[in-house]
């Protein structure tokens, strides 16, 4: 089986599940990012804090202030990861019997936890100012475990709510939130596509 695939269903249809994965009984899938600063609800806090019908909306306004004055972007400087110790994490995972580790390299929130070349809104430039994914990968591979990375970027364009009174509508924040657009319609991406317009 080739390690290279083309962007066609026929190419992807040639994939088969690796033997090591069939034998691995336990793996660790990690959701860890800026959304743990408010530590309320779950990793969908950035989405829910802009939904007036969700408990996170009122919680955010009561604890942090209105979404125009204090938006999700304002948690980024607070996400310092000063106690982040990938070796300690991997030691715990290995002792649990895990055979593979898969962090969410980028959640729907639009904040890559790695050195993404397409945005300045990333962990290597803001928050911890570290390549969290690369550090974890090195520690995982050093222990002989399998490593994967999951990207949830494809949902970013419909993750946030855009309206007056929210910081999500400010064009200066489009690198994190995607450009403001009507709900349910694709946003125009600011990510480069090699000369072609790209929808995200």
Image: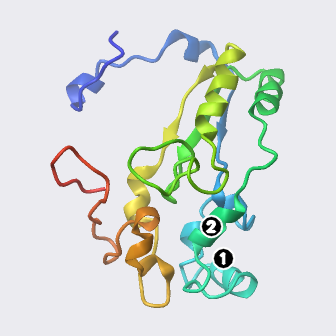
Question: Could you say which is closer to the camera, residue 185 or residue 187?
Answer: 187
Q: Is residue 172 above or below residue 176?
A: below
Under circle 2, the secondary element is: helix
Distance from disc 2 to disc 1, alpha carbons, whole Å, reads 7 Å
Q: Residues within 10 Å of mark 2 (few under 14, many from 20)?
A: many
**Picture coordinates of residue 73 (x, y %)?**
57, 69
**Picture coordinates of residue 105 (x, y %)?**
54, 42
Residue 145 makes an appearance in the image: no
Question: Left or right of 105: which side holds 117?
Answer: left
In the rendered image, the quadrant that contains the C terminus is bottom left
Q: Is residue 119 above or below residue 102?
A: below
Q: Which residue is mark 2?
A: 45
Q: Are marks 2 and 1 in contact (CB under 8 Å)?
A: yes
Residue found at x 64% / y 24%? 138
Question: Left or right of 91: which side holds 124?
Answer: left
Residue found at x 59% / y 32%? 134
Q: Residues within 10 Å of mark 1 (few under 14, many from 20)?
A: many
Sequence-wise, the earlier of marks 2 and 1 is 2
Quadrant of the rendered structure where residue 39 is?
bottom right
Residue found at x 64% / y 58%? 34
**Picture coordinates of residue 64 (x, y %)?**
71, 81
Q: How many marks on residues?
A: 2
Coloring applied to the structure:
rainbow
Q: Which residue is mark 1?
A: 56
Under circle 1, the secondary element is: helix
């Amino acid at each position: 089986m080739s390690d290279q695939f083309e962007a066609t269903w026929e190419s992807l249809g040639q994939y088969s599940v690796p033997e090591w994965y069939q034998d691995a009984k336990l793996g660790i899938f990690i959701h860890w990012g800026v959304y743990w600063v408010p530590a309320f609800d779950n990793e969908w806090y950035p989405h829910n804090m802009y939904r007036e019908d969700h408990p996170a909306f009122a919680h955010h306004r009561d604890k942090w202030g209105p979404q125009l004055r204090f938006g999700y972007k304002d948690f980024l400087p607070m996400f310092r990861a000063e106690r982040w110790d990938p070796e300690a994490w991997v030691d715990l995972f290995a002792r649990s019997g895990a055979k593979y580790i898969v962090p969410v390299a980028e959640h729907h929130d639009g904040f890559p936890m790695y050195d993404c070349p397409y945005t300045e809104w990333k962990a290597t430039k803001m928050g911890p100012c570290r390549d969290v994914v690369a550090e974890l990968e090195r520690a995982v591979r050093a222990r002989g475990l399998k490593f994967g990375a999951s990207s949830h970027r494809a949902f970013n364009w419909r993750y946030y709510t855009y309206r007056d009174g929210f910081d999500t509508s400010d064009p200066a924040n489009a690198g994190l939130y995607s450009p403001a657009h009507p709900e349910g319609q694709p946003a125009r991406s600011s990510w480069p596509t090699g000369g072609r317009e790209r929808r995200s």
